[in-house]
Image (spheres, rainbow, N blue to C red):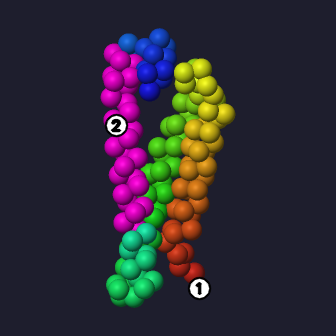
Amino acid sequence: FSTIGQWMSDTIDTGLGDFFGSYGAYIVGSVELIASSILLIASISWILVTVKVLKDASFYRQWYVVGGLLSSAIMSGAAFFHLVTPLGVEVLHQGKSDGGSLFYAAVSILLLGLLLAFINRAPQSSLQ
């Protein structure tokens, strides 16, 4: 986040870059925690319905849609910053490359979150 914060300071606004460099990881991490909690609640609900502990918890599909879309939104930001900023697809840390694994993970979560939302969307009523 410090690399992106420095880039924001140089290109957009110093105050915004300093804020993002200092607090960006906390904000993004908190939203990631919310998204993963939503997906965990949906999964636990689905399991409880499958083993017939709960009779009707069809609401879990709505949670999958929300969690999938929120995950995709977060990862679209990650993919954007990897592609547009000096961070790059391959992140260097202490002289070693990650081989692009962070970028590829972000793109795969973005796509799978959209797929999860699509699969669990509300059924279309047939017009007759």
Label 1: few (<14), some (14–19) or many (≥20) C-alpha neighbours in 10 Å: few
Residue 88 visible in this rendered orientation of the protein: no
Residue 37's image quarter? bottom left
Instruction: State the residue position of label 1.
Output: 128
* Percent of width and height locating residue 106: 56, 43
Front residue of 88/9: it is 88
Which type of secondary structure does the marked residue at label 2 adopt?
A: helix
The percent coordinates of residue 124 (x first, y second) are: 54, 75
Q: Which amino acid does label 1 sit on?
A: Gln
Q: Choose top left, top right, bottom left or bottom right for residue 27.
A: top left
Magenta residues: mostly which secondary structure?
helix
Residue at position x 35%, y 18% in the image: 18
Give percent across and percent down for residue 70.
44, 51
* Magenta-colored stretch includes residue 26: yes
Would residue 117 appear left or right of 15 to someone viewing this image?
A: right
Residue at 57% in and 81% down: 126
- The part of the chain drawn in magenta is 15-42
Is 91 rendered above or below residue 61?
Answer: above
Disc ID at residue 27: 2
Residue drawn at the location 42% of the way across and 61% of the way down: 39
Other-residue count near label 2 (Cα within 10 Å), few / some / many at <14 / 14–19 / ≥20:
few
Quick one: label 1 or label 2, which is nearer the N terminus?
Answer: 2
